[in-house]
Image: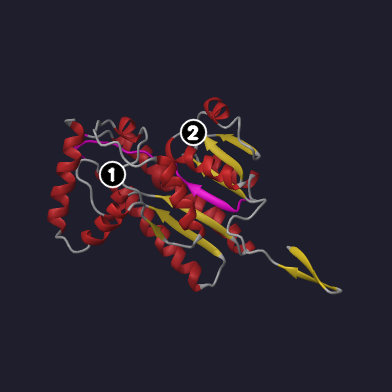
Amino acid sequence: MNIIKIGVLLIPIKCYNKYEVNMKALITGASSGIGLSFSKYLNDLGYDLVLVTRKKDKLEDLVKDYKVNVKIEELDIKNINDLEKLFSNNKDIDMLINCAGFGLFGEFINTDLDRELEMIDVNIKTLHVLTKLYVKEMVKNNRGYILNVASMAGFSSGPLMSTYYATKNYVIALSEALNFELKKKNKNVIASCLCPGPVNTNFNRVAGVKFNDRGINSDYVAKYGIDNLLKGKTIIIPTLKFKMAAFFRRFAPRKLILNIIYNYQHKKNNS
C-alpha cells in the first residue's frame, strides 16, 4: 500500500502489481529442467522459494547465488505423510508449482509395472494431494496461484508412452475443472496448466529414449508459464507451433493422431 499526499490529505493507493513483493512460491521437481528454471525466474521476480527435491546437496549448489530466501525440502514426494508434513511446515505459500514428473517409453505390455506405478504416484498422486491441500488454504485466504505442469501429451492418447500420456491427460482435466470451479465461486485463486511440447531437459534420458530434436529452452518455458499464470490463463501452451498443433488436433480423426504419435515415439527409440 502506497500513500500519496494531495494538499493536506493522505490517500492510500493500492498497488496492483502482478509481481507482488514478499511473495513465496513452492516448487516440486526443482533440482533440474523446468523446475530449476522456474526457481531462477521467480528469484528474478523477488519471490522467496521453497524448493522440493530428492537431491538437496546438488540443489544447494545451484541456488547458492539467489538473492531471495530459499528453503530446500528434501523428501520423498510419493509419500503422502511427507506431503502433509511439507504442507504443515509451509502453509504461507502464494504460488504452488507442481513440476515433478517423468515418463517411460515402451509398449504397455512390456513396460515395468512398478516403474509405471511410481510414475502415477509422482505425476498424479503427488500433484493431486498438494493441489488439494494448498487450494483449500488459498481459498480461505482468497488469494493464490497454482501451476500444474502437464504436456502437449495430455491432449491425446500416446502409443509407446501410454501411461505417461494418460497421467498428463489427468493433469489437464483436473486443472481445467478446478479453475472453472474457482471462477464460479468468484475466488481470487487461479489454477492453470502448463502444456509445453518437447523441452530441452533430461526427460528423454529418464524415459529411456533418444531423440535428435533439441526441444524448447526450459528457461523460456518457465517464464512463459509464470507470466501467463499471473495473467489468469487456464491452459498455457508455449510457442505458436504447439498452439496450432493443439488447435488442429481437435479436427483430426483420432486414428490419424494415434498413428502420428506412434511414428513420432518410434523415431525416438531409433535415433
Label 2 Cα neighbours within 10 Å, binned few <14 / some 14-19 / many ≥20: many
Q: Which mark is residue 31?
A: 2
* Residue toward you, 194 or 9: 9
Q: Which residue is mark 1?
A: 163
Question: Residue 112 vs residue 195: left or right?
Answer: left
127 is within the stretch colored magenta: no
Examine the residues drawn in magenta and state their main secondary structure.
loop
Q: Tell me if residue 200 can be seen.
A: yes
Where 140 falls versus 34 (above or below)?
below
Spot occupied by residue 236 in the image (x, y as percentages of width and height) = 39, 56
* Residue toward you, 94 or 245: 245
SS category of the residue bearing label 1: helix
Label 1 Cα neighbours within 10 Å, binned few <14 / some 14-19 / many ≥20: many
Q: Which residues are magenta?
A: 93-110
Question: Residue 152 vs residue 98: left or right?
Answer: left
Question: Quadrant where the C terminus lies?
Answer: top left
Quarter location, residue 162? top left
Spot occupied by residue 241 in the image (x, y as percentages of width and height) = 27, 52
* Residue at (69% x, 66% y) in the render: 14
Q: CA distance from mark 1 to mark 2?
A: 24 Å
Quarter location, residue 6? bottom right
* Residue at (33% x, 52% y) in the render: 239
Where 207 falls versus 121 (above or below)?
above
Say which amino acid is labelled 2.
Answer: Ser
* Residue at (52% x, 58% y) in the render: 230
